[in-house]
Image (spheres, helix red, strand yellow):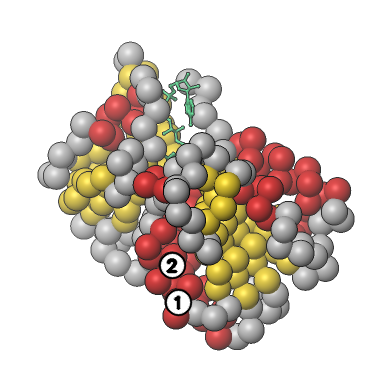
Amino acid sequence: MPFKIFPMRVTDSRHVTPSILQLSFERDDGEKIEYQAGQFINIHFENDGKKIHRSYSIANTPGGEWLEIAMSPVEGGRATTLLSGLSVGDVIEGSGPYGRFILKDDEPTRYVMLATGTGVTPYRAMLPLLEERIARGFSVDVLLGIWRREEALYADEFLAFAEQQPGFTFHVCYSRDMPDEVADHECEGYVQARMQQLDMDPERDIVYLCGNPDMVDQATAWLKELGFPIARLRREKYLPSRR
Ligand SMILES: Cc1cc2nc3c(=O)[nH]c(=O)nc-3n(C[C@H](O)[C@H](O)[C@H](O)COP(=O)(O)OP(=O)(O)OC[C@H]3O[C@@H](n4cnc5c(N)ncnc54)[C@H](O)[C@@H]3O)c2cc1C
């Protein structure tokens, strides 16, 4: 079935870390924005006379009249240059929602959710659903990999959530610069290495992996070796587009 393109009006644009830009949109055709936490949208635009599109995970919880995306800059990137130049009131084309990187109908278990960079946005959108699941006996560990502390996207929100929810932990791993003073939830290195210290259990855990394709592939290879069936691995790779 062909996808339906709709107009999206920018309602807010702000840096949420020194490099990451958060953009908010409302549909400009009066229709509702419907999606499930964890899905993504495509934005469509013209480049050199050709129509192209790029995908962005939806960063806010469903149910509102708007959607948010968090965008990491890419030097010379076509979509990221376009998105960086948008002002409130501008209208672009979107389609979606797409994707199956969502919470499924699982029995109570432990979710281990890894992300690099903006790959943490699906988990932010899932927080109210995770709260319901934790109340039903699930536990959840979110691990975010990032270069340095100031780029730890939405870390305050995850930390505040962890304070309220005993069944939830949040860890941040820095692959480039370690802060001088390190908090309990912080560590040095790659997020996939931190995961290996979590007593991973193929019979119990369900693992979500989102963001950098190398992280997703390395984590998948290690988990498979540990005996994880592919059905217990849910993955969203932020693969660069070919055109
Ligand atoms: C399902 C899905 C969800 C995604 N969600 C998000 C999201 O929430 N936030 C977000 O910021 N991005 C997300 N992405 C990535 C996004 O779709 C674009 O690929 C990215 O923004 C770059 O697009 P661009 O048009 O600016 O760069 P392009 O014009 O496509 O690329 C310009 C150059 O940069 C290279 N390049 C592209 N991406 C990278 C990169 N990450 N690192 C280094 N070099 C690169 C390209 O190979 C090319 O040489 C997602 C991708 C997928 C598939």
| Left or right: 195 in relation to 25 | right
Q: What residue is disc 2 on? A: 159
- Going by the numbered disc 2, the residue's amino acid type is Leu
Looking at the image, which is closer to me, 184 or 197? Answer: 184
| Left or right: 122 in relation to 65 | right
Q: Position of residue 16 (x, y in %)?
A: 30, 49
Q: Quadrant of residue 63?
A: bottom left
Q: Disc number at residue 141? A: none
Looking at the image, which is closer to me, 98 or 237? Answer: 237
Q: Is residue 78 above or below residue 179?
A: above
Q: Is residue 13 above or below residue 227?
A: above
| Left or right: 28 in relation to 124 | left
Looking at the image, which is closer to me, 54 or 80? Answer: 80
Q: Residue at x 81, y 63 (%)?
A: 202
Q: Residue at x 74, y 46 (%)?
A: 220
Q: What residue is disc 1 on? A: 163
- Going by the numbered disc 1, the residue's amino acid type is Glu
Mark 1 burial class by Cα count in 10 Å: few <14, some 14-19, many 20+: few
Q: Are marks 1 and 2 in contact (CB under 8 Å)?
A: yes
Residue sitting farthest toward the front: 180
Q: Residue at x 63, y 78 (%)?
A: 138
Mark 2 burial class by Cα count in 10 Å: few <14, some 14-19, many 20+: some
Callout 1: CB less than 8 Å from ligand 1: no
Q: Position of residue 175 (x, y in %)?
A: 55, 40
Secondary structure, mark 2, is: helix
Picture mark count: 2
Give me the C-alpha separation between circle 1 and circle 2. Answer: 6 Å
Residue sitting farthest toward the top: 48
Q: Residue at x 61, y 44 (%)?
A: 190
